[in-house]
Image (cartoon, rainbow, N blue to C red):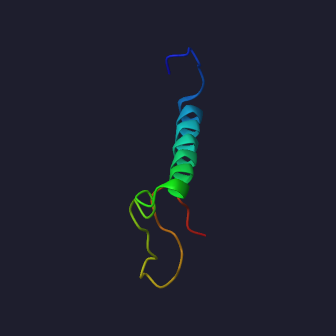
């Protein structure tokens, strides 16, 4: 950031993601081209319903 703001990189990244999400929501209200943009997610067909992605513990 060019303003001299210094903070943990994870926090700055989270702020940037939040701002981008807010901008997308604001634009979606005025522009139909923005709606539906982005990858879709789907449920796994594994059957047990537990998450097994890296970094997410399975209970």
The one nearer the camera, 45 or 3, is 3
Residue 42: give x, y in percent of width and height: 44, 74
Residue 32 image-quadrant placement = bottom left
Q: Position of residue 38 (x, y in %)?
A: 40, 59
Q: Nearer the viewer, residue 17 or 29?
A: 29
Considering the image in quadrants, where does the C terminus appear?
bottom right
Residue at 47% in and 67% down: 52
Above-or-below relation of 56 to 9: below
Q: Residue furthest top?
A: 4
Relative image position of residue 28 (x, y in whole percent): 51, 56
- Nearest the viewer among 55 and 25 is 25
Residue located 59% across and 34% down the image = 11
Question: Please, which residue is most extreme toward the bottom here?
Answer: 47
Figure label count: 0
Q: Position of residue 26 (x, y in %)?
A: 56, 50
In the picture, measured across the screen, residue 12 lies left or right of residue 53, that is right
């Amino acid at each position: 950031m060019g303003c001299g703001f210094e903070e943990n990189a994870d926090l700055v990244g989270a702020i940037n993601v939040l701002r981008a999400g807010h901008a997308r929501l604001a634009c979606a209200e005025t522009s139909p081209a923005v709606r539906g943009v982005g990858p879709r997610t789907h449920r796994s067909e594994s059957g047990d319903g537990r998450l097994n992605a890296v970094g997410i513990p399975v209970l």
